Structures are given as structure tokens and as C-alpha cells.
């Protein structure tokens, strides 16, 4: 047997180096005085004042371990949403929960499905669990139930559906989600990632509470990073059947939420006025941006979230790449979405009034 240099150092497990690391939204525009970060779907309203106060108060007790059960946070979520706290599990961002679900249900040889333009984090966690990602085609930049169902095989263990999806902003009406669930084998876990649920103002939308409550194979994940404005603290939660909570609880970090996150999250979700304000703000500026960008001749995917996917012309001089460089030079940072199958589009977060007006003006200039 020959020993190579490669054998003389630790080697990551099979398949791990095939994973492409997640690339977060850009933050900087070098040399520009004022920067508007519109690349990560953060709220322009900031966090609730009560949440910030609770965070500050937590600084007085930094020597004490956090409550490993995140009791105060689960109780606040349960109160506000009318749920049983026993069916809630919190995570260090919903990203952590998505990863834990993969570690819990996927083994090498298993498969998990997500959709063509679906959130990229799924693929990373599926592969990290040693399983195989399977991509179901979308139709018109929207998840398609029949395509997902026809991708199911006896090896399928999880189906991930971001509803609404990022980066498209499109959603599946609840009848469609129900039809998807009805077509899945009972041993397949349906994960409804409802990160943007609070923003959706559609009568035919539901985040998934009812389906989770009545089925053994559905989980809904939520986040404090978007409408609650607590992305920096990393707080997510899932609502799930008791057997799923029990299984995931066995492998999560015993103190996966820090104390500041627990108290700030509880204060944030109880501050309904702040949430209502964020919804009202989005209700005003989402249609405004969509109309303005459309009037500039850009195609905008109809969105129900706090962001829009903006498509650029075929003209190489006016491409998404060129627009991105131009906007960055003016201080407007948007998100490239090539990795999501949109090489000629940018994702734009609904920002402050100043940011929204400024980005439209800059794009108008760019397109001249
Ligand atoms: C932002 C986002 C999340 C939230 O991630 P956190 O880890 O909770 O910050 C989850 N899913 C989708 C689709 C998102 O866009």
C-alpha cells in the first residue's frame, strides 16, 4: 500500500468537499460613502424597541448558561400563534433547524427534494447529511406540485418547500400545498419553510399550522430574521408533531439559543404593533417598487415577500451583472442570484423610502 500526502492529514467524509459553501449577500460598496444594503431581505424598520431593551438587559447575566429549553421564547411564540409550546422547537436561526431535520431524517442513499429556484441552504444540508439532493422543475418561477410528486421515489425522505420562496417571492396557495401533502407517502417529511409568512397578504395563503396540527409528517419552520428584524441574533423556530420534536431534540446543541436571543425574541414576537407596522410598510412599498421597475421596462416576478426578483434585458450592456456593478458604485447593494438559476436577474429587498426611491432612480439612469 502506498501512502500519499493526502492520507497524512485528516480527510473530510465522502461527498463533503462537493458542497459549495453558501455565499451571503454582499455588504460593502468600496469607496461609497452611503451604503444601502438591499441584499439580504433585512427589514428597514429595525427591531422592536422592547426587543432591544431585553437584549441590553441580558448583558447583566452573561456568566449564566442560557435556558436550554428556551422556555420564555417558546411560550411567547405559543401565546401569539395560539399553539401548544410542546410542539415548538427553537433554533439558532431557522437554518439550524433545517440542518437538524436533515441530520435527523437523512442517511447516505436517501434523497431529498427541493424546487428549481428554491432556497440554496437545503442543498447544503442535504449533502452534509450524506444524502442526494433532487431538484423538481418549477413552472413560471413557481413551485409545481406535480413536478415535486413525480420526483418522489422510495428513497425520498424529505421534501422542502419554501412558501413563499426566496429568491422568487412566489407562493403556493394552500390548496396546492394540501394537494402536495396528499400525494406524498406518509413516511416522507414535508418541510414548509415559511420565513416570509408574516408579509403575505393573500386569502389563499396559509403558513402550514393546520397541516402540521393534523398530520404526522409535516413541519413548519419560521424565523425572527425577517419581519422581526433580529437576523443578527439568529433565532428560528419550528412547529412540528411531538415525535419530530422528540427526535430533533436528541441531537441539537443543548444551549443552541443564547440568552439574549431568548429574551429579545420573546419581546419581539409579543410586539404586535411593530409587526403590523412592518407589514403596512411592505404593503406600500412592494407594489410601488414593482410598478416603478416595470415602468422602467424591467420584468419583475410577482412577489408576496419583502423583496422582488428583477430581470434584466438580453442586451449585454444592460445585464444584471452590469446593473449590479453600477448600483454598487452608487451604494445600492442588491443580490446576484446566478446560483439560483437566474444569471440575468437581481434580488432587491424592500428598503427604506430613501433606499427604494434611490434604487429606482439609479436603475433609471443605468438603463438610459
Ligand atoms: C431568510 C430565510 C430563512 C431564515 O434563515 P435564518 O436562519 O432564520 O436567518 C429561511 N428560509 C428562507 C427561504 C429564507 O429566505
Image (cartoon, rainbow, N blue to C red):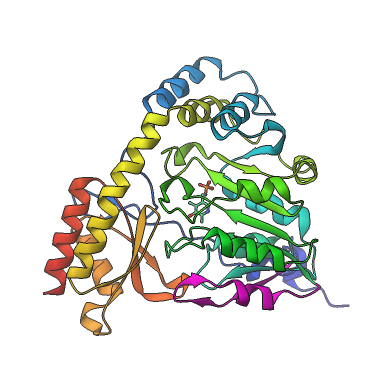
Which residue is nearer to you in this view: 152 or 354?
A: 152
Tell me where residue 245 appears, x and y as whole percent: 75, 42
Residue at the limit of the structure toward the bottom, as seen here: 315
Which residue is nearer to you in this view: 349 or 16?
A: 349
Q: Quadrant of residue 31?
A: bottom left
Tell me where residue 3 appears, x and y as whole percent: 81, 73
In the image, taking residue 173 as reference, residue 33 lies left or right, namely left
Q: Is residue 150 magenta?
A: yes
Q: Can residue 66 be seen in this snapshot?
A: no
Tell me where residue 110 appears, x and y as whole percent: 78, 68
Residue at the limit of the structure toward the top, as seen here: 60
Q: Which residues are magenta?
A: 131-154
Residue at the limit of the structure toward the right, as seen here: 1
Residue at 43% across / 38% down in the picture? Answer: 228
Quarter in which the N terminus is drawn: bottom right
Is 52 situated above or below 327? above
Q: Can residue 193 be seen in this snapshot?
A: yes
Residue at 46% across / 60% down in the picture? Answer: 166
Tell me where residue 91 appears, x and y as whole percent: 62, 40
In the image, taking residue 139 as reference, residue 185 lies left or right, namely right
Is 59 situated above or below 282? above
Label total for image: 0
Q: Is residue 153 magenta?
A: yes
Q: Quadrant of residue 323?
A: bottom left
Q: Quadrant of residue 239?
A: top right
Residue at 48% across / 58% down in the picture? Answer: 164
Is 165 situated above or below 208? below
Quarter in which the C terminus is drawn: bottom left
Amino acid at each position: 500500500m502506498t501512502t500519499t500526502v493526502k492520507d497524512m492529514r485528516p480527510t473530510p467524509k465522502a461527498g463533503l468537499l462537493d458542497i459549495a459553501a453558501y455565499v451571503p449577500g454582499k455588504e460593502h460598496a468600496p469607496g461609497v460613502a452611503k451604503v444601502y444594503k438591499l441584499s439580504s431581505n433585512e427589514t428597514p424598520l429595525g427591531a422592536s424597541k422592547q426587543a432591544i431593551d431585553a437584549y441590553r438587559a441580558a448583558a447583566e447575566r452573561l456568566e449564566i448558561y442560557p435556558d436550554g429549553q428556551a422556555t420564555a421564547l417558546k411560550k411567547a411564540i405559543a401565546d401569539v400563534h395560539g399553539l401548544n409550546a410542546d410542539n415548538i422547537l427553537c433554533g439558532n436561526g431557522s437554518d439550524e433547524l433545517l440542518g437538524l431535520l436533515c441530520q435527523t431524517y437523512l442517511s447516505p442513499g436517501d434523497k431529498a427534494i427541493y424546487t428549481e429556484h428554491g432556497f440554496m441552504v437545503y442543498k447544503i444540508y442535504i449533502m452534509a447529511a450524506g444524502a442526494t439532493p433532487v431538484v423538481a422543475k418549477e413552472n413560471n418561477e413557481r413551485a409545481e406540485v406535480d413536478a415535486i410528486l413525480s420526483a418522489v421515489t422510495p428513497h425520498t425522505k424529505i421534501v422542502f418547500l419554501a412558501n413563499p420562496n426566496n429568491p422568487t417571492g412566489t407562493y403556493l396557495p394552500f390548496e396546492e400545498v394540501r394537494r402536495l401533502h396528499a400525494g406524498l407517502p406518509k413516511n416522507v417529511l414535508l418541510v414548509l419553510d415559511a420565513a416570509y409568512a408574516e408579509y403575505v397578504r393573500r386569502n389563499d395563503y396559509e403558513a402550514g399550522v393546520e397541516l402540521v396540527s393534523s398530520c404526522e409528517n409535516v413541519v413548519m419552520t419560521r424565523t425572527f430574521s425577517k419581519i422581526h428584524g433580529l437576523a443578527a441574533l439568529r433565532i428560528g423556530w419550528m412547529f412540528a408533531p411531538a415525535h419530530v420534536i422528540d427526535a430533533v431534540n436528541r441531537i441539537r446543541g443543548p444551549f443552541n439559543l443564547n440568552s439574549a436571543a431568548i429574551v429579545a425574541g420573546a419581546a419581539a414576537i409579543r410586539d404586535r404593533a411593530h409587526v403590523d407596522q412592518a407589514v403596512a410598510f411592505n404593503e406600500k412599498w412592494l407594489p410601488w417598487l414593482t410598478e416603478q421597475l416595470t415602468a422602467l421596462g424591467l420584468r419583475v416576478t410577482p412577489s408576496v415577500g419583502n423583496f422582488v426578483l428583477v430581470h434584466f434585458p438580453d442586451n449585454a450592456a444592460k445585464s444584471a451583472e452590469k446593473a449590479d456593478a453600477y448600483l454598487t458604485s452608487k451604494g445600492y447593494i442588491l443580490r446576484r442570484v446566478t446560483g439560483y438559476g437566474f444569471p440575468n436577474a437581481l434580488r432587491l429587498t424592500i428598503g427604506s423610502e430613501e433606499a427604494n426611491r434611490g434604487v429606482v432612480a439609479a436603475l433609471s439612469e443605468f438603463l438610459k
